[in-house]
Image (tube, rainbow, N blue to C red):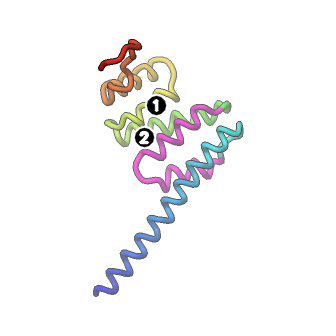
Amino acid sequence: VLAAAALVAALAFAVTGRDHRTCQDAREGILSAVVGGRAADRSDVEDVRDVCRGTDGLAAAASALSRSADRDQRAQALELAREAAAAEPDNSVAWRAVAAAASGAEATSARRRVEALDPLPFRRSSGRSTR
């Protein structure tokens, strides 16, 4: 029984490790494509959706794609950002991705949500020390 439990744990760890690497590769592929002025591979975007755990991968991919010169990829960025915010409505990183990818009232609303969740980064400095 103990050997079987150890085998199940080892297999789960191997699958989780492989998924983590696939997720990292997909995120890096998207960022590399955008920085290089190329369209990100659809397979990388799908891997982020299907393999990455939580919403960090969605938000990171959305943030990168929102900087793309390609209109379709910017639309995809907004879709991913909305997915992340819907899945974790209290995640300021997801709302930052929405704010970066959206425009108009949706972007304004997302920025307000970020301020409500994480107000410190949005405070403007007066240029004076607080010490």
User: Which type of secondary structure does the marked residue at label 1 adopt?
Assistant: helix
> Which residue lies at the image location 61% right of the left edge and 45% below the top edge?
30
How many numbered marks are there? 2
Q: Percent position (x, y) of residue 83?
A: 44, 40
Q: Percent position (x, y) of residue 65?
A: 58, 37
Q: Dot 2: few (<14), some (14–19), or many (≥20) neighbours within 10 Å?
A: many
The residue identified by callout 2 is 84
> Which residue lies at the image location 56% right of the left edge and 48% below the top edge?
27
What secondary structure predominates along the stretch shown in magenta? Answer: helix
Q: Percent position (x, y) of residue 37?
A: 71, 36
> Which residue lies at the image location 29% right of the left edge and 85% below the top edge?
2
Q: Toward the viewer: 82 or 9?
A: 9
Please give the range of residues in magenta. Answer: 41-68
Does residue 25 lie above or below 126 as drawn? below
Does residue 72 lie above or below 3 as drawn? above
Q: Is residue 44 magenta?
A: yes
The residue identified by callout 1 is 98
Q: Quadrant of residue 7?
A: bottom left
User: Which type of secondary structure does the marked residue at label 2 adopt?
Assistant: helix
Q: Percent position (x, y) of residue 64?
A: 57, 37
> Which residue lies at the image location 54% right of the left edge and 58% below the top edge?
22
Q: Amino acid at mark 2?
A: Ala
Quadrant occupied by the C terminus:
top left
